[in-house]
Image (spheres, rainbow, N blue to C red):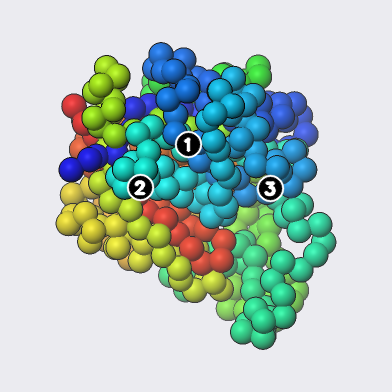
Amino acid sequence: MTSAVIVDVVRTPSGKGKPGGGLSGVHPATLLAGVLRALVERNDLDPGLIDDVIGGCVTQSGEQTFNISRTAALAAGFPDSVPATTVDRQCGSSQQAAHFAAQGVLAGAYDIAIACGVESMSRAPMFSSAQGKDPNGAPLAHRFPEGLIQQGTAAEIITRRWKLDREAIDAFAARSHRLAAETAAAGGFDNELVPAGTLTADETIRPGTTAEGLAGLKPAFVDEAMKQRFPEIEWSITPGNSSPLTDGASAALIMSEEKANALGLRPRARFHSFAVVGDDPLLMLTAIIPATRKALARAGLTIDDIDAYEVNEAFAPVPLVWQHDLGADPAKLNPRGGAIALGHPLGASGTRILATMVNHLEQTGGRYALQTMCEAGGLANATIIERLD
């Protein structure tokens, strides 16, 4: 049976997603073109062999509109015969792109595909695509008459419902920076990083971060209307225990194991199982729990079989809630830090996490790893990969 394998996976450093950030002067199509070009150059691959480029991007407006994956593929110098498309599964967009690419290989539709993603949150700010318009419409308002809520408020709700306190989530955020800084200092990210512009290392990691320092930050999502609607909230989500606005791009070279062998390329990992689920759009951030259970069941594995879990740190309570409900080993959770330190360039985060996960397995000798990501609207993807010798 055909296997879908990862031959290579790379990412740019994470740039602060604001004017003056290390990647803010780079057009997002140029960011994405850089990682696409790096994949073919690192593997001495003829880009004309690529059957499709599938890219994730959330804010598809301004400089990120008009099918940015196609724009980037052309900017990377790929032949005009190589097609490309851009998908939006919100924060999981490039993880979904990896699913589509791998599933295309498994179905026999592709021999070689690239899954990728990009987000320049400095140049295409979050929510700017709505341009002040209502993206939901009357039928959705009728179904949810009290209105949907923003993710920061959802993070506050799960913090309260799972009885997490401010000290616990600040401690987890500090842990993210510590682990990321230790990994960077040891060269653990070197194999996945592709310089972009003048940036050669993640500028979102703050090595000196402590829980005590984070405790002085004020909650970022306090809202008078939400106070009345959810009086139980204690308001503890701050910029310090949330992922920062980030610029970045990432890409994975995915193909059939047979094609990799025919080209003399070494498969580094194989896709073992996939899941995508919908869940409560009000809580929004909890779909990672049923998505993980579904992926494990499809793989015939238990949580204890997994050597590393990558649960996107959109907000600190998200992986903590996941860990609680799955009974997961905290030492295996985001062992190189997560989005709180490494950034969350929305459309690029799925393949960014995949890059970090593949390298972690190789550098530690682990066999299985799982990644999952909460997505706006109450969605989540989960992916299990297996390292290959």
Residue at image position (62%, 26%) is: 74
Would residue 33 be found to the left or right of residue 43 on screen? right
Residue drawn where x is 28% and y is 25% of the image:
260
Q: Residue at x 60, y 58 (%)?
A: 237
**Which numbered dot is residue 60?**
3
| Residue 110 visible somewhere in the drawing | yes
Q: Quadrant of the C terminus?
A: top left
Residue at screen point 59% across, 27% down: 80
Q: Earlier in the sequence, mark 3 or mark 1?
A: 1
- Measured in 3D between alpha carbons, the distance from the residue under mark 3 to the one under mark 1, in whole angstroms, is 20 Å
Viewer-closest of 199 and 348: 348
Residue 222, image x, y percentages: 70, 66
* Camera-nearest label, 3 or 1: 1
Q: Nearer the viewer, residue 248 or 240?
A: 248
User: To which residue does mark 2 refer?
Assistant: 103
Q: What is the CA distance from the residue labelled 1 to the residue labelled 2?
A: 12 Å
The answer to whether mark 3 and mark 1 are in CB contact below 8 A is no
